Image (spheres, rainbow, N blue to C red):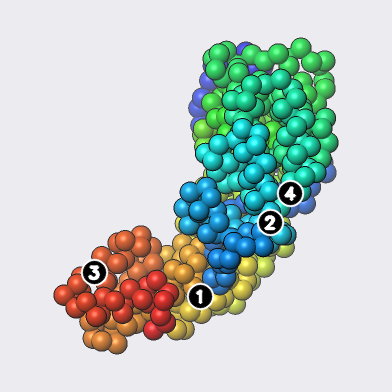
Amino acid sequence: MYSLILHGRKSLELQKWLHLRSVVDLLRNESAFSPNPSPNPLSSLSNSFSSASVAASDVNLQDDQKGNNFTVSYLVGSLGLSTKLAESIWRKVSTEGKANPDSVLNLLRSHGFTDSHISTIVTNYPRLFILDAEKTLTSNLNFLQSRGASTSEFTEIVSNVPRILGMRWHKAVGRYYDFVKDIIEADKSSNYEMSCLSLPQGTCQENIIRNVLALRRLGVPQKLLFSLLTSNFHVVSGKERFEESLEKIVGMGFDPTNSKFVKALCVVYQMSDKTTEDKVNLYRKLGFTTGDVWEIFKKNPLFMALSEKNIQNSFETFISLGFSRDEFVTMVKHCPQCIGLSAESVKKKTEFLVKEMNWSLKAVVSNPAVFGYNLEKRTVRRCYVIKALMAKGLLGTELPPLSPVLAVTGEAFLNKYVMKHDDDKELVAELMAIFTGDRAS
C-alpha cells in the first residue's frame, strides 16, 4: 500500500473508510508499534481547549515598555497584532523567562524580515523572544543566509519553520532548512520531486524525504508537513513504523488536510500495541465501549495520548463532584477535552456553576464545553450579569438555561441580555461594566 502512495497511484484501500471495529482489531492484532514507546507522547503538543480552561485567573498584563519588558501593548504597537493574540504570546513567553523583544525584532528586520513575516514567526514560535539574540539567533540567521538563497526565499523558508532558529547545531539547522526549501520548490513545480531523493537509501534524511513525499501526495498541507519535520517525535524519520502508522490513520478515515490527521499519526506512531490495548481496557473499565474510544479518538486524537494516571485521576475528580459514571462518559463523548483537565480547574468551574449559580449537575452534563471556558473572563462575568438582572426582577425568578448564557458568542450574549435594555442607559452601563470586568456584581 505504501509503495502505491509513493508512486502517486490511487489505492482503493486508502480511499474507503474502514469500519471502526475492524480498526480496533487491526490495532490489537498487528505488532506494528514501537516496543518502547515514550511516556506521555504528545505532552508538548498544545491543546487550545485545555490551555484556555486551565487558566484560572486573569493575566496581569504589564504596560510599561521601558527596561526591555515584554508586554502586550508592545506587541500590538510594534507588529499590529490583535490584543487577544498578543496576550496569548505573552502568556507563553512569560512562563519561560525574560524576553528581549527589541533585540529580536531589530535582528529579524536587519535580515530582511517584514512585520508580516515577524508576526507569522512569533505567532507560531513565541519562544523566539526568549532566545539569545546575540548568540543563538545571530549565529543561525547568518549561517542560513550564507547558503545562497535570495532574501525572499530565505525569509519565506524561515517564516514557515521558525523553530529552526532555536536549534543549537548548524548541521541540524541546515538540514531542516534544505528540507523545507525542497518542499516549497517541489510544490511550486507541482511534481513533488526533490533533489534530496539522491541521498543514500536507509539514511534518516532519505526516510524523511520519502515520507514527506507520501504525505504530500495524500494531500497533507505544507504547514502541517513543516510541523512534522521539526517535531520532537521524529515521526517522519522512521520507515516501517511510519508506513504502518500511516496506513492505520488513513484507514480510520482521518482527513489528510486536517491537523487531526497529523496529531493522530503522532499518537499512533508513539504507542505500542500493549499501551494501546491497556488504554482501551482502562477506558472500558470507566464505562466506555471500545467503539466509544475510537469515535472519541477521531474527534480528538490527543485523547489517547493521556497517561493512564491522568485518565484515572480525571475520572475520580468528576465522580467526587457528584457526576455519575454514565454522566462522565456522556460528557467526554460530547466534549473529549473534558478528560485530562486539571482537578483544580474542574472543581472550581463545577462549584461555581452548581453551588453559586444553582444550575443542576444535569445542566452541566448537557453542556460539557463549559469546562473549556475561561472561568474569570467568560463564565463569572456573564453569570454576574445574569445575577444582576435577576436581582432587578428583569429575568424572572428562574435561571435561564445554561447554554444561551455561556455557549453563545459574546456579541450574542450582549444582544440577548444587555442591549435589549438600551432604553435604560444607566442599566446598560452597569451591565457592561460587569461584562467587561470593570466592576464586580
Bin the neighbour count of mark 2 within 10 Å (Cα to Cα): few under 14, some 14-19, many 20 and up.
many
Q: Is residue 259 visible?
A: no
Label located before the other in sequence (4 or 3): 4
The residue beneath circle 2 is 99
Q: Amino acid at mark 1?
A: Thr
Residues 240 and 133: in front is 133
Label located before the other in sequence (4 or 1): 4
Marks 3 and 2, how far apart at CA: 41 Å
Q: Amino acid at mark 3?
A: Met
Label located before the other in sequence (1 or 3): 1
- The residue sitting at 71% across, 27% down in the picture is 145
The residue beneath circle 4 is 131
How many numbered discs, if any?
Answer: 4
SS label for mark 3: helix
The residue beneath circle 1 is 350
SS label for mark 2: loop
The picture places residue 237, in percent across and down from the top left corner, at 76, 30
- The residue sitting at 48% across, 79% down in the picture is 352
- The residue sitting at 41% across, 80% down in the picture is 439
The answer to whether residue 379 is left or right of residue 27 is left
Residues 240 and 168: in front is 168
Q: Is residue 299 above or below residue 439?
A: above
The picture places residue 260, in percent across and down from the top left corner, at 56, 41
